[in-house]
Amino acid sequence: MSKQVLVQLAAYNTWANVKMYTACANLTNDDRKRAMGASFGSVHGTLNHLLLADRLWLSRFLSEPFAVGSLNDELYPEFADLSRERPLTDARLEAWVHTLNDDALDSDLTFTTIAKRQQITMRLGHAALHVFNHQTYHRGQVASLVRQLGHAPPETDLLYMNM
């Protein structure tokens, strides 16, 4: 895993989140919170999960406390609060990625999972890659939900980022 790839993925993540939140701002609150069978229920639930997961990973990367009971915990019930907090967390992810070097990326990260309460050790570079892959996976779910609600989801493919 290279720092250069992670820097690009962090920038992409920020860009795609801006586009997704902008699209979701056009939904009604009822539509954002409508249970639609997604992994985390709704548009709001999925966006909340992504923010929670990113903060959880940052707490692991930075050895900072972050108390969470489950991956379903609601950080912010209001979309305005999620919208305010998302770019702050994206900026922290980008800043953290810029601090990495090859030695750090090749080091081990040991943490306890939330869902199964088991200890896992993995390379830090792979854990960082997982964070950005996880974001892309769930943003795809949000895009599908936005489409099901009768709206056009934003184009968030990486190849369109610098166009």
Image (spheres, rainbow, N blue to C red):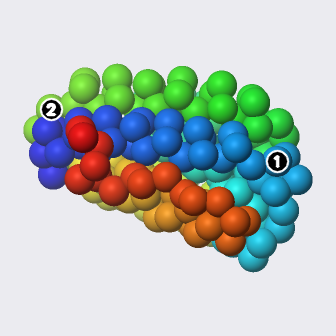
Mark pair 2, 1: CA separation: 43 Å
Q: In this view, does 71 lie to the left or right of 132?
A: right
Q: Position of residue 106 (x, y in %)?
A: 17, 47
Q: Which of the two residues, 122 or 90, is positioned nearer the viewer here?
A: 90
Give above or below for 40 relative to 70. below
Q: Earlier in the sequence, mark 2 or mark 1?
A: 1
Please give the label number shown on residue 101: 2
Q: Where is residue 97 in the image (x, y as percent from the top left)?
A: 29, 32
State which quarter of the image contains the C terminus.
top left
Q: Which of the two residues, 146 or 74, is positioned nearer the viewer here?
A: 146
Q: Residues within 10 Å of mark 2 (few under 14, many from 20)?
A: few
Q: Which of the two residues, 120 or 129, is positioned nearer the viewer here?
A: 129
Type of the residue with mark 1: Thr
Q: Which of the two residues, 50 or 148, is positioned nearer the viewer here?
A: 148
Residue 94 occupies which quadrant of the picture? Answer: top left
Please give the label number shown on residue 43: none
Q: Position of residue 51 (x, y in %)?
A: 60, 42
Disc nearest the viewer among 2 and 1: 1
Type of the residue with mark 2: Asn
Residue depicted at 14% across the width and 39% down the height: 4
Residue 42 occupies which quadrant of the picture? Answer: bottom right
The secondary structure type at the circle numbered 2 is: loop
Q: Where is mark 1, residue-wise?
A: 28
Residue depicted at 15% across the width and 51% down the height: 1
Q: Position of residue 7 (x, y in %)?
A: 23, 36
Q: Residues within 10 Å of mark 1 (few under 14, many from 20)?
A: few
* Tag 2–tag 1 contact (CB < 8 Å): no
